[in-house]
Amino acid sequence: MSTKPAGSNTPAGRAWPHRSSELGDRLPDGFVLGTGTSAFQVEGGAREGGRGESSWDPFTATAGRIVDGSNASVAADHFHKLDEDLTLIRELGADAYRFSFAWTRVQPDGRGALSRTGLAFYDRLLDGLLTAGISPMATLFHWDTPIRLRGGWLGRDTALRFGDYAHMLGEVFGDRIDSWITLNDPATVFLNGYALGTDAPGETRRFAALPAAHHQLLGHGLAVQGLRAADVRGRIGIANVHTPVRADSGREADEVAAELFDVLHNRIFADATLLGRYPEPPEPYLLETRMLLETDPDDLRTIHQPLDFYGLNYVQPSRIKAGPAAPKSPAGPPREPGKSETTVSFPFHVTPFREFPVTGTGAAIAPEYLGVALAELHARYGDRLPPVWITGVGAGFADATDRYGVVEDPARIDYLAEHLIAALDAVAPGGVAEGVDLRAFVVRSLIDGFEWTAGYTQRHGLVHVDFLDANRKRTPKSSYRWLQQVLAAR
């Protein structure tokens, strides 16, 4: 964790809205620049076609869980407005579109036969993408665990069912999907969902939540096996949110706390998938984390499957201080949270990087640390690291709508440009992550959606969605037009 950010290489403060062609010229030949969404955040259609309930459905129905008291039963209504959204993707000119299958839409109970209605929706989506020459990038699991799978990822059976689900989808769509992502951000599901209770399903088990991390990884390994058994033609990988971790001070207690956080957030997931073993936690926490060192070697062999790419999602670095968090400041992954309150914490907490500006949701704007994340992956895994795809970068900002209905979001343009440039600089000759084979960058997200515990109080889309309009009117923002120009300038 000693890599220093290459701050001097980050072109902070430039007027990127007027320099789209310059950025387009920076993109290497064959580099994939795309955008995406996730099913629960945008689809809606919660009672359409026999869709089953996921862990997020009852979670959103519980008072106090979601900042604005909203739910995702309609969201951006992507389920009914698919044709309009396909037009937006096509006119953007994106190389790839990352979407997720709603597990409960295609397999309502998390087991058994697949739903014809659910499959038909994704069949239309894939047809539209392929007709437009856009590469489909499909995620099998983006947090919507079927509620009928008792215990969720705490139970080993969920991993087994996930492997079956992956194989079945591979048999149906294996000839039409270019890229498969097994899991999205398993660290967030483990920490926020099962350890701290700030996300669905709301479990507060602290270290006793470690089985949820292991079973997700086991499910990943079984899913890779299932996809390969289905002889899918697409590439296969996983995506996790990685955060460079720094101690709040040089005190030994803070250094140990930072090491523990790095293990729980980053290394459990990358070490298991890329090295076939779990990392050894710092000595003061061997008892709490003993299950990592007692894992069945057969499980680790299943988890350690050959991958075609490793997906990196990035939000911000994490500064860690020893000691539990205050009740209103939960220690968890640095995903822009909805600030659900909790009294549960690990023996560490996140402190702010006051030297950086922040997004509308309070996340540090530190694009140079994206380069650090890439450098740390390279330093830790060397030739075990497959090609890296940045599978999710985006941020929430206040969008201004003028009287002509134009949505201006220059801060989002700057944010996306700075992060893309930081990534390209990092892997260039002489960069901090030289040697990393970086092949893709996915902007999150195409359209505004339900932002988990933040509900509709935050917007991340390139396209504005009017959630007060029954028709969910779409209006491309200035960031959409800017990215459109970048893509056209290559």
Image (cartoon, grey):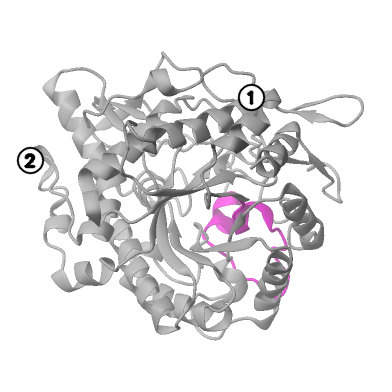
CA–CA distance in space, label 1 to label 2: 47 Å
Identified at 71% across, 34% down, the residue is 482
Q: Residue 445 at x, y = what percent?
A: 62, 45
In the rendered image, the residue lying farthest to the left is 283
Q: Which residue is mark 1?
A: 16
Count residues near mark 1 (Cα–Cα under 10 Å), then give few for <14, some for 14-19, many for 20+: many
| Image: 4 above or below 227 | above
Quarter of the rendering containing residue 69: top right
Q: Which residue is mark 2?
A: 283
Image quarter hosting the N terminus:
top left
Q: Residue 183 at x, y = what percent?
A: 43, 60
Of callouts 1 and 2, the N-terminal one: 1
Quarter of the rendering containing residue 5: top left
Per the rendering, the mark at residue 112 is none
**For this rendering, which residue is in front, 419 or 82?**
419
Q: Residue 96 at x, y = what percent?
A: 60, 56
Residue type indicated by callout 1: Trp
Q: Are marks 1 and 2 in contact (CB under 8 Å)?
A: no
Identified at 55% across, 56% down, the residue is 56
- Which of discs 1 and 2 lies nearer the camera? The answer is 1
Q: Is residue 131 visible?
A: yes
Identified at 14% across, 44% down, the residue is 281
In the rendered image, the residue lying farthest to the right is 404
Residue type indicated by callout 2: Glu
Magenta-tinted stretch: 36-61
Q: Is residue 65 visible?
A: no
